[in-house]
Image (spheres, rainbow, N blue to C red):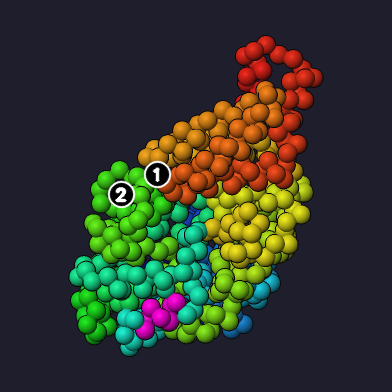
Amino acid sequence: MKDSTGGGTTGSTDPVTQATATRGERRPAVTVYVPRDSAARSVGADEIADALRQGAPDGGPDIDVVRNGSRGMLWLEPLVEVATPDGRVGYGPVAPEDVADLLAAGLLDGADHPLRLGVVDELPWLASQTRVTFARVGVTDPLSTRDYLDHGGLAGLRAALALAPADVVAEVTRSGLRGRGGAGFPAGIKWKTVLECADELKFVCCNADEGDSGTFADRMVMEGDPFMLIEGMTIAAHAVGASEGYLYIRSEYPDAVATMRAAIGIAREHGWLGRGILGSALDFDLHVRVGAGAYICGEETSMLESLEGKRGTVRAKPPIPAVEGLFGKPTVVNNVLTLATVPVVLAEGADAYQDLGVERSRGTQVFQLGGNVAHGGIVETAFGVTLRELVEDYGGGTFSGRPVRTVQVGGPLGAYLPTSMFDLPMDYEAFAAAGAMVGHGGIVVFDDSVDMAAQARFAMEFCAEESCGKCTPCRVGSVRGVEVIDRIVAGQHREENLALLEDLCDLMTEGSLCAMGGLTPMPVRSALAHFPDDFLARRRVLEIRPAHTTGARTEGTA
């Protein structure tokens, strides 16, 4: 039996290879795909792959097991796919103990079974998306150079190398590609600043410290299509004149770290990294660095401090990293999704990317559905899709079956939006006008049992825990915020404390060095604005059921 785990450079074995068995000639090998994505592995994908390797029926075909990335339908993981003349037929969610029954029922022929989902590409949840950045994720063997090239890999880099650096920057700018890490700053403008710096030494840094709640797209790209990220960073290096790049990956992503390191080694062997890339004059190499678990290192200057071997604290701006970044040199700092989208922009042209999206939000965003949601996973579609479509149509409502009450968009510092705002289109400007942010595209769903006063308190508590401590508004303001919210929900001088909380939010927003303290008021204010009654609930409890001082303090603490 044949196996392609993705560890080599040639990818899956030839599906028409035949093997000789004791009972005579076997049928041609059948390719079966089992995800190697860590989400799938956490629910038994490795055990399923082992069972398939050992389960080829006597007299039947060999099984060529390919470990692909995840399609992003996480409620169906592990999703097993079998190649058939009609396309790849999916079965899921599959447990290791289901494998024998699936093989007996005719899995290798795509036969009917209670777990059979149909041709995966035709499933409405997937077919209705516009997959640009995620076009290969879940389709190919992540570490197969042959798969990568067969599915359009390196087309963007070859197109970029045929252009002058300034023309590459102009193409990225014209596409309207904006940073997908949260700020939404135009990528081309940042690149142009670095290009125009005269320094001989420049860097490209990929911020893969994906710490926002409900976000996992960066991880899935690194585990499912690592060469795409390498290609994007190499294009950026050519565009700005950089010779060295760093991938800063959070320590909680060991599978992503291992996959990226393996992919970088393979890319070097094939001349995709190193000296004279693809026969050009470009010299560029790439290194992986693992973070130490601090949320604040997702902020670009704090990440640069960490890369330099220092404690992760925020730098004051100016100077901006594009002028004085890593080791004081001009540095491109972009998010995984931004850099992974660059090859598509160069391969297909800026106009094709501009055709997607709305207003100043061009192209697609990779939305991540999490929390109390029935169908969690990846939805990539053009900007302009509504929050309601994402939560109700793609997400299927709550996992608990209770009504949706709110969603938080943009990570732990994003606003809580009530169902009355679910027709809001997903684009940067529309969200900003509504006092919210798209951020990294994470959408966390809550049902009607959520306590919004507790959520507001958590925002301040989270900031107090994760602040780098460099600026007073963030370091001290977040601690005071927890205390003030506790007094509000305990019914202590409520009006005065509400006014104090508003002043504190103003101070943190205007006075903090970075978005950590500056955005923490956003979830607090949104909870107060849209769910004010939750801040009265504990007061009613205290009035109905008096308690001693210690008891009252406990009940009044979220």
x, y percent for residue 513: 42, 46
Placement of 11 over or under 489, stated as above or below: below
Circle 1 is placed at which residue position? 294
Residue 392, quarter of the rendered image: bottom right
Q: Secondary structure at mark 1?
A: loop
Q: Secondary structure at mark 2?
A: helix
Of label 2 and label 1, which has the lower sequence position? 1
Q: Residue furthest right?
A: 544
Looking at the figure, which quarter contains the N terminus?
bottom left
Residue at 64%, 63% in the rendered image:
430
Circle 2 is placed at which residue position? 306
Residue 19, quarter of the rendered image: bottom left
Write down the region rendered in magenta: 167-173
**Residue 540 visible in rendering:** yes
Looking at the figure, which quarter contains the C terminus?
top right
x, y percent for residue 452: 67, 39
- Crowd around label 1: few <14 · some 14–19 · many ≥20 (10 Å): many
Asked if the residue under mark 1 is in contact with the one under mark 2, i.e. CB atoms within 8 Å, the reply is: yes
Amino acid under label 1? Answer: Ala
Whole-angstrom CA distance, mark 2 to mark 1, is: 10 Å
**Residue 60 visible in rendering:** no
